[in-house]
Image (cartoon, rainbow, N blue to C red):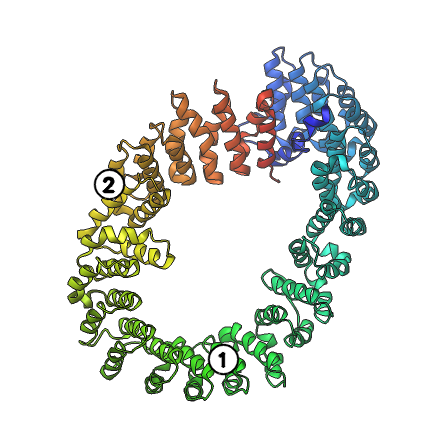
């Protein structure tokens, strides 16, 4: 059946000739002869001369109008290709070619199917001046062959609003394909086709075409504007999941125009059974400001799921360019008291993202009696960052709030407001002495977050090391490490903490020494001793701390080498990283370090990668060699790890990678190509190596793709390959040049030449690449139009022309 052939194609693709391609042409072209000369050539006996002259006139834009009478006469030429070329140009001349309408209608029944199709396309290009062709186009759609039936509804769409009744008629055609393209034509017309809303709404219930027509029918309704909203609301309320989903997807495309659907959509947020809540929220966000009031009002609804959905949607609006004005603030602040934590946890970030304008309301909320409201207000002020500097006195006051959660939140908020938060340190120090365990923990932690600003808190933090609670002691140690280089007496206290009875305290003390103990001669010996601790967590903390000290910890190298033999992976991996960071003994640690890089613990593998990138000259060659050997590992994760490390080495790895292109294992060669391409063409030898890889059948495809992905640097290599006498190279290059997208514009001429290649794969690849290059390939339009004659490539060419579309 004809319909089955239609459904896989772009409904407007064949309008490219008269429409989008025409819009790329307007104006004179220096490489074309003047109009008068081309008109004379239309009279020549040679059919190629007549055909080419007609095409040439089509490239001249409005300047070719004097040729219209001659082109109309050419519509009766005995050669069908000449008739096609004449219709092509007349369609590009738009309404100025109105005198051609009668002859073009006649050609809808031409013996040649391609002429029929091109006549329909030309009538669409002439637009509203072709009103007289409407009945003939309707008949052609119902009775014509495959191509004509495809082109006629789209041509009606370009004729404009006068063709809406005809397209409505086609919506009830028996042929599925005709209905499909009629809908798409109405979609392209937009609100001008509003009279088609009732007929389009009926298509939503056409179950035989639900899978194919629903997306187009729904989208068509979305394009028709506000008048389509009631029909989409009705579909949204359907019990059929597919129809319900289609409706909300369509409403999302309408943006603020769908404001009439807001009440129904907001109400649906509270329906637990719906599976489309993500789409509903997305649609409300796209509607934007018109939905805000209803969403804020929904925050007071008795149904928890509706309040949660409304709060989440308002938060998502702050992530988009939807500005919530001050009218939303009272409702949001009131929702900070919601009994549902999910509501509160969406509302305070929403307030925080609304900017400084909400600060007065948040400060007022801090005086409320309900701790939930105060806590939310504090969180929101913290989210404002330095903009909340004016609120620092209120946040300091909140440190002493009767509610521990509010106090802790205030501590966190103060760390976000920048240097001005220094004035809060005395209050945080007071909280270190609080009877509340939560306040003591929070104060210690957030003093550390303030870093060097909290240096004056050192004595209080030292005192906190005597706290009965391990959590307080650990946080105090952490904070001391964050304050910057420590005085000798502080280092002594941290060294003493290495002997604490609690393993987490000892481990944290080691970490703190690595952060702040660099100036003391006591630090390294103490950490070396800690490498012998009975607990692996403590040993790994000591190894990590020694690495943080870098070359200052050079005396620890023997102990770290011994730690490479530790049975616990956390210890040996961090010892290996530390050896590299110290820049001594790194070569001996490389095998261990590589194993650490493969560790499933992300923190361990990330540290290993960082260490590999920082190995010194003595160890770098060994590291590169180790990684190249691993490119052939049976485990794909190990291969990926090795490739990532080589990319991290950059230029230092390129000589070895180039040599490895001769490796006997194709898996190794494939990963070498991947590494070279990501290191980049700026490194000497990398681009040349990738060019040579095109000769290796095992890796040629990856090399070609990667060269295309490079953009401009890879073009010369691929262009050279496309000119090669070797078919395999041309096939690879033709399809890969498009990967550079607009950057491949310099390659358009050679791709045009490839459209005439004897091999269909090369031609297909060239078409695909030109389409991917997009508007930058507009110079290829005439050649692509010529390529429409290749039936095997027609669909691909149509798609390429569609992607090249541009405007004057």
Q: Is residue 92 left or right of residue 682?
A: right
Quadrant in the rendering for residue 54: top right
Q: Is residue 47 left or right of residue 700?
A: right
The image shows residue 218, relative to residue 579, as above or below, that is above
> Horizontal and vertical percent for residue 403?
55, 84
Q: CA distance from mark 2 to mark 1?
A: 56 Å
Q: Is residue 409 left or right of residue 364?
A: left
**Residue sitting at x 42%, y 83%:** 422
- Identify the image quadrant of the C terminus: top right
> Horizontal and vertical percent for residue 118?
69, 24
* Residue in the foreground of this view, choosing between 296 and 195: 296
The image shows residue 411, relative to residue 52, as above or below, that is below
| Secondary structure of the residue carrying numbered label 2 | helix
**Residue sitting at x 45%, y 33%:** 736
| Secondary structure of the residue carrying numbered label 1 | helix
Residue 102 visible in the displayed image: no
* Residue in the foreground of this view, choosing between 368 and 424: 368
Of marks 2 and 1, the one in the foreground: 1
Answer yes or no: do the residues labelled 2 and 1 have beta carbons within 8 Å?
no
Q: Label 1: which residue? A: 408
Quadrant in the rendering for residue 182: top right
Q: Label 2: which residue? A: 655
- Identify the image quadrant of the N terminus: top right
* Residue in the foreground of this view, choosing between 616 and 430: 430
Label 1 CA crowd tier, 10 Å (few <14, some 14–19, many 20+): many
Quadrant in the rendering for residue 531: bottom left
Q: Counting residues from the N terminus, which is met first, the one under dot 2 or under dot 1? A: 1
**Residue sitting at x 40%, y 30%:** 719
Label 2 CA crowd tier, 10 Å (few <14, some 14–19, many 20+): few
> Horizontal and vertical percent for residue 52?
59, 20
């Amino acid at each position: 059946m004809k319909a089955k052939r239609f459904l896989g194609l772009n409904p407007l693709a064949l309008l490219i000739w008269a429409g989008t391609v025409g819009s790329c042409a307007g104006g004179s072209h220096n490489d074309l002869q003047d109009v008068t000369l081309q008109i004379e050539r239309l009279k020549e006996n040679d059919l190629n001369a007549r055909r080419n002259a007609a095409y040439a006139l089509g490239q001249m834009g409005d300047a070719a109008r004097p040729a219209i009478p001659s082109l109309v006469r050419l519509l009766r030429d005995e050669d069908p290709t000449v008739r096609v070329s004449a219709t092509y140009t007349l369609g590009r001349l738009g309404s100025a070619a109105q005198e051609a309408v009668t002859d073009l209608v006649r050609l809808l029944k031409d013996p040649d199917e391609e002429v029929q199709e091109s006549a329909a396309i030309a009538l669409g290009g002439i637009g509203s001046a072709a009103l007289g062709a409407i009945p003939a186009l309707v008949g052609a759609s119902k009775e014509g062959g495959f191509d004509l039936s495809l082109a006629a509804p789209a041509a009606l769409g370009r004729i404009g609003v006068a063709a809406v009744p005809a397209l409505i008629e086609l919506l009830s055609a028996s042929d599925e394909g005709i209905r499909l393209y009629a809908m798409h034509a109405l979609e392209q017309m937009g609100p001008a086709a509003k009279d088609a809303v009732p007929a389009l709404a009926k298509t939503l219930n056409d179950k035989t075409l639900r899978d194919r027509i629903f997306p187009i029918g729904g989208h068509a309704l979305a394009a028709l504007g506000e008048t389509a909203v009631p029909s989409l609301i009705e579909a949204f309320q359907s019990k059929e999941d597919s129809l319900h989903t289609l409706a909300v997807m369509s409403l999302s495309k309408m943006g603020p125009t769908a404001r009439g659907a807001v009440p129904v959509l907001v109400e649906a947020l509270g329906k637990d059974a719906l599976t489309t809540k993500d789409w509903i929220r997305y649609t409300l966000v796209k509607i934007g400001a018109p939905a805000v009031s209803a969403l804020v009002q929904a925050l007071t609804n008795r149904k928890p799921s509706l309040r949660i959905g409304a709060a989440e949607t308002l938060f998502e609006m702050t992530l988009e360019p939807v500005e919530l004005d001050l009218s939303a603030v009272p409702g949001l602040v009131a929702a900070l008291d919601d009994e549902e934590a999910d509501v509160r946890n969406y509302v305070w970030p929403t307030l925080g993202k609304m900017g400084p304008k909400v600060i007065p309301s948040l400060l007022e909320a801090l005086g409320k009696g309900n701790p939930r409201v105060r806590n939310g207000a504090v969180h929101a002020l913290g989210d404002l960052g330095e903009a909340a500097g004016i609120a620092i006195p209120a946040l300091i006051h909140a440190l002493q709030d009767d509610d521990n959660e509010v106090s802790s939140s205030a501590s966190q908020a103060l760390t976000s407001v920048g240097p001005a938060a220094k004035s809060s340190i005395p209050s945080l120090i007071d909280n270190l002495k609080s009877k509340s365990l939560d306040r003591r923990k929070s104060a210690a932690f957030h003093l550390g977050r303030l870093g060097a600003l909290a240096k004056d808190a050192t004595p209080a933090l030292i005192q906190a090391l005597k706290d009965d609670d391990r959590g307080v002691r650990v946080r105090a140690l952490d904070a001391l490490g964050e304050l910057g280089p420590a005085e000798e007496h502080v280092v002594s206290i941290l060294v003493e903490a290495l002997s604490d009875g609690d393993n987490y305290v000892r481990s944290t003390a080691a970490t703190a020494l690595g952060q702040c103990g660099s100036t003391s001669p006591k630090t390294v010996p103490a950490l070396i001793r800690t490498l012998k601790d009975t607990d692996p967590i403590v040993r790994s903390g000591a190894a990590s701390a020694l690495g943080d000290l870098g070359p200052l910890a050079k005396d620890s190298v023997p102990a770290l080498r011994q730690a490479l033999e530790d049975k616990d992976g956390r210890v040996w991996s961090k010892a290996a990283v530390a050896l590299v960071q110290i820049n001594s003994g790194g070569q001996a640690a490389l095998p261990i370090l590589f194993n650490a890089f493969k560790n499933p613990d992300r923190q361990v593998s990330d540290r290993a990668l960082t260490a590999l990138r920082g190995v010194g000259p003595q160890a770098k060659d060994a590291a590169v060699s180790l990684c190249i050997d691993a490119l052939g590992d049976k485990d794909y994760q190990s291969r990926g790890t090795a490739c990532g490390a080589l990319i991290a080495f950059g230029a230092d790895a390129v000589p070895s990678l180039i040599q490895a292109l001769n490796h006997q294992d194709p898996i190794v060669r494939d990963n070498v190509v991947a590494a070279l391409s990501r290191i980049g063409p700026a490194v000497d030898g990398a681009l040349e190596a990738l060019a040579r890889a095109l000769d290796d059948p095992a890796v040629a495809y990856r090399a070609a793709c990667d060269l295309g992905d490079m953009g401009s640097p890879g073009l010369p290599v691929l262009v050279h390959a496309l000119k090669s006498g070797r078919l395999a190279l041309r096939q690879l290059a033709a399809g890969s040049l498009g990967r550079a997208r607009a950057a491949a514009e310099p390659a358009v001429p050679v791709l045009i030449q490839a459209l005439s290649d004897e091999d269909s794969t090369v031609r297909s690849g060239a078409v695909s690449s030109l389409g991917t290059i997009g508007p930058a390939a507009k110079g290829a339009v005439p050649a692509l139009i010529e390529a429409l004659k290749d039936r095997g490539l027609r669909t691909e060419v149509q798609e390429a022309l569609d992607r090249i579309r541009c405007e004057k």
